[in-house]
Image: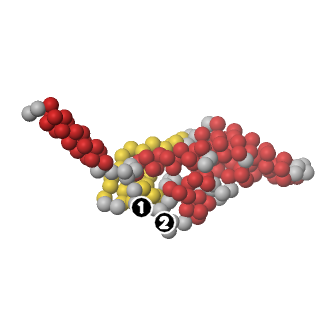
């Protein structure tokens, strides 16, 4: 085979290699989608979270359920301290056609502990401050200080969560609430 033949063979091989690379999937990895969602949440990019949900999912309701809409009420410093205690790690995923399941583990503050401490200490503080004539703003500021104090030493729980996604075009989209359920049944029973 002459040098022209070798060059032609090389060019054909190169062309096939490029074509095969083009045949690869552009579909995102479902674990990457969950991780990207978490990064946006942690960064406070709440306006961008809606894009992670599948068509027809009531993402506004889900985000309200986890308190993102009311975050301003607790104070930015408390909200950040709470988020700083939270983490998510994806462990693996399974794909079954157009559906995927991402196996994740959350590190979450023990909310039962948080609310029980807040209830016990906060009730006394807010009641005594109200009787002393403190304004609503002063009471809220003191409650924020109390929440920060509780968060300093709060126990952290590991919570497994299977996060469901579906494929829409080349993207994986969340089909429901990706956050772990908060089990406050024991706390509610004590009240």
Scheme of colours in the image: secondary structure
Residue at 75%, 47% in the rendered image: 143
Q: In the current view of this chain or complex, which residue is farthest to the bottom?
A: 56
- State how many labels appear: 2
Residue at 68%, 56% in the rendered image: 70
Q: Around disc 1, counting alpha carbons within 10 Å, would you say few (fewer than 14), some (14 to 19), or many (20 or more)?
A: few
From the viewer's side, name the closer residue of 179 and 19: 19
Q: In the current view of this chain or complex, which residue is farthest to the top?
A: 3
The quarter of the image holding the C terminus is bottom right
Q: Can you give x and y, in whole percent of width and height, for residue 157 in the image?
A: 51, 44
Residue 119 seen in render = no
Q: Around disc 2, counting alpha carbons within 10 Å, would you say few (fewer than 14), some (14 to 19), or many (20 or more)?
A: some
Residue 130 seen in render = yes
Residue at 62%, 44% in the rendered image: 82
Q: Quarter-wise, where is residue 168 in the image?
A: bottom left
What is the secondary structure assignment of the residue under circle 1? strand
Q: In the current view of this chain or complex, which residue is farthest to the right?
A: 133
Residue at 45%, 58% in the rendered image: 173
Number of the label disc, if any, that sits on residue 13: none
Circles 2 and 1, Cβ within 8 Å, touching? The answer is yes
From the viewer's side, name the closer residue of 83 and 159: 83
Q: Is residue 106 left or right of residue 75?
A: left
From the viewer's side, name the closer residue of 52 and 109: 52
Q: Is residue 169 left or right of residue 43?
A: left
Q: Can you give x and y, in whole percent of width and height, for residue 132 in the image?
A: 90, 49
Q: CA distance from mark 2 to mark 1?
A: 8 Å
Which of pointers 2 and 1 lies earlier in the amino acid sequence? 2
Which residue does the numbered mark 1 point to in the structure image? 168
What is the secondary structure assignment of the residue under circle 2? loop
Q: Can you give x and y, in whole percent of width and height, for residue 115 in the image?
A: 64, 50
The quarter of the image holding the N terminus is top left
Which residue does the numbered mark 2 point to in the structure image? 55
């Amino acid at each position: 085979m002459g040098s022209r033949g070798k060059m032609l063979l090389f060019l054909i091989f190169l062309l096939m290699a490029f074509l095969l690379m083009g045949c690869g999937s552009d579909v995102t990895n479902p674990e990457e989608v969950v991780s990207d969602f978490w990064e946006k949440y942690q960064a406070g990019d709440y306006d961008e979270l809606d894009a992670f949900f599948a068509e027809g999912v009531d993402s506004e309701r889900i985000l309200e359920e986890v308190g993102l809409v009311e975050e301003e009420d607790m104070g930015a410093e408390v909200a950040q301290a709470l988020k700083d205690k939270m983490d998510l790690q994806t462990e693996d995923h399974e794909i079954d056609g157009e559906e995927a399941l991402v196996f994740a583990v959350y590190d979450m503050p023990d909310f039962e502990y948080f609310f029980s401490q807040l209830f016990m200490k906060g009730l006394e503080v807010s009641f005594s401050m109200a009787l002393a004539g403190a304004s609503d703003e002063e009471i809220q500021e003191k409650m924020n200080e109390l929440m920060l104090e509780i968060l300093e030493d709060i126990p952290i729980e590991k919570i497994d969560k299977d996060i469901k996604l579906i494929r829409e075009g080349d993207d994986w989209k969340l089909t429901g609430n990706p956050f772990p359920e908060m089990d406050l049944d024991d706390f509610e029973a004590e009240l």
